[in-house]
Structure formats: structure tokens, C-alpha cells
Image (cartoon, grey):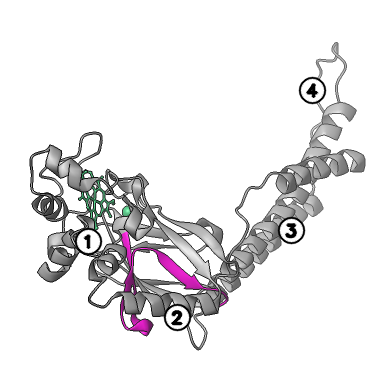
Amino acid sequence: MAGIGIVIAILVTLVAVLIPWLPTSASEQMDRIEFVYWFATVICIAVFALVMAVLLYSVMAFRSPPEDESDGPPIHGNTGLEIAWTVVPAILVIAIGVLSAFVLSKNGEAGPNPLNVKVFAQQFAWRFVYPDDGGLKSGELVLPLDRTVKFEMESADVIHSFWIPDMGQKQDLVPGITTSIIVTPTRTGMFSLVCTELCGVGHATMRATVRVLSQDDFAAWVKERKSGGGKPNAGAAIFAGAGCGGCHTFTPAGSNGEIGPGLDDIVSVAQKAGRDPAEFVREAIVEPGKVITPGYQDGVMPPNYGETLSPEEIDALVAYVTGAKK
Ligand SMILES: [Cu+2]
């Protein structure tokens, strides 16, 4: 019986270890979440192996011969066994519960000096604001390595949900309230932020890139973005800050989003349609539902840039996208 149990435990362990069920952890919080998973998985493997060993052994050892149709002997149970199979699982479940509660509370700790980042979600785009860095705006989530980040999140319309799979933590954004979540990145590189709450037709496209930089590179990025927010590149800063690059490929901005049409040839697209490029782009930004680019869906591009951006910001953006000035 012990032999069967060991074979089953080895087989199931191989399934657990050899298949990459989870992404490689990129945050302290994800490390703790993985630990809880492994803790529960080891318990599950032990219980599964024990139950299967007893079951398979019994099927083979107590098999009745084909001609035997008599009833089995009446058995009244076994008090010792029943206590054991009630108490042991109770202890295991409580252990998983206590460990989970501990990890949940640890993962909610921001520490003494977190970097604050505000997250704004709306159908179907993410925007990020860095209040500690003079209200810097970005459509890409850029984070420093090994620094705890506290996200404060708001939704402008429906319920969205913030999830960076490699970093484990997940939190809903609910209209009318501010929710928060803590992440401490432990690996540099590019990751994806996805919306995990079905929020409308564009839900599947509601993604943002997450870039984790060393602390020095992060400081350099902040500096560059702050100086880029001045007069000459105002359009570029707004393009980046409003999240346009998440959906549109635009070479001057270095963006490669593929959810909306590429904007590199926007001037000739407008001219072919017999329109003034600036007017065409302005309309596309302020009233995206008015003319839908063939092959793309209505209702994906956020409809309220006319309200969230000031008239000067829209002017700068139109000039930038049409290449009117650098
Ligand atoms: Cu969403």
C-alpha cells in the first residue's frame, strides 16, 4: 500500500513541478502568494496519495471472486478512524487559512516610504499619475525595482480590475470609491497589466505595458518625462500621458499599440477622405464614434477625451499627431 502511495505522490509531484502553472514571480507579494500555493499543493498531494493508495489497495486486495454474490459483513464504523479523518483535515484547513491570512495582511503593508501611483481606469484604457513626481502622467506604467509601490485606483465608469499576472496582486476599481493595492517589483523588464473584469466590448483590449527599471533608470525616466512636458513636446507628453500609445502605433512616440489604426500615415488618410488633417484628427479624438475607421470597432476608443483633456491639450495633441510641429 505504501508503494502505491509513493508512486502516486511522485507522479502528481511531477505534474505540479514540471508544468509551469504560474508565471515567474516578479514581486515580493507574488513570492508570498506562490508560497501559499505550494503549501496547499503539498498538502493536497499527500492527501491525494494517501486516499488513492488505500482505494487502489482495497480494490485489489478485497476483490470478491466472480461467483460470490453474498453480502459483505456488517461493519459499524471505527471511532478512532473517524476522529482522525475529521481532526487531521480540520488542522490542515486551519493551517492554510492562517497562512493565507498572514500573507494577505503582509501583502497589504505599504511600508514607511512607498512610491504613490494613481491609477485611472475607463472603458478601455489605463492612465497613471505620479503625485510624488509633480503629477507626472503616463499611459505606460513605469516602476522602480525593489521599491514598494502603493496604487490608489479610481474608475470613471464601470468596474474594472487591475492585474499584473507576474506580480500576483489583483484589485477591483469600483466607480465612486478609491481602492488600493501594494506591489514591490523584484525583476526588471516588461510585463502586462490586464483588466480582469468584463467591462464592455473593448474589455479584451484593455491592457497597458508595465516597465520595471532600476532605481537610477527610473529617476532618469522621471527627469526626462518632466522636461519633455515643457512647451516644445507638449503633444508628445499628452500622447504618452493619455494612453494613446497603448492602442495606436505612432513612430514619433515610439508606440506600437495595435488595438486602433496606426497613426503614422494619418495625414494621407485624412487627405484621401477629402478632409483637413487637423480637423479629421480633432474629430477622431473628441468624437471617436462619429467616423469609425473601417476594420475597427466603435466604442473602443475612450469617448470622453473632449472632457478629460483641456482645449489647449487637444490642440497640442492634434499638432503632434498630424506632425504640424515637433
Ligand atoms: Cu476594464
The residue beneath circle 1 is 320
At x 47% / y 71%, what residue is drawn?
143
Q: Nearer the viewer, residue 125 or 319?
A: 319
Residue 136 % position (x, y): 32, 76
The residue beneath circle 2 is 115
Residue 297 % position (x, y): 23, 39
Asked where in the image residue 35 lies, by quadrant, the reply is bottom right
* N-term mark: 2 or 4: 4
Task: Say whether residue 10 is magenta.
Answer: no
The residue beneath circle 3 is 88
Distance from the alpha carbon under mark 1 to that under mark 3: 67 Å
Picture disc at residue 71: 4
Task: Say whether residue 130 is magenta.
Answer: yes
Decide if ligand 1 comes within 8 Å of the CB at mark 4: no
Judged from the image, the secondary structure of the residue bearing numbered disc 1 is: helix
Image position of 125 with respect to 258: above or below: below
Question: Which of the two marks, 1 or 3, is nearer to us in this view?
Answer: 1
Judged from the image, the secondary structure of the residue bearing numbered disc 4 is: loop
Distance from the alpha carbon under mark 1 to that under mark 4: 87 Å
Q: Nearer the viewer, residue 211 or 229?
A: 229
89 sits to left or right of 132? right
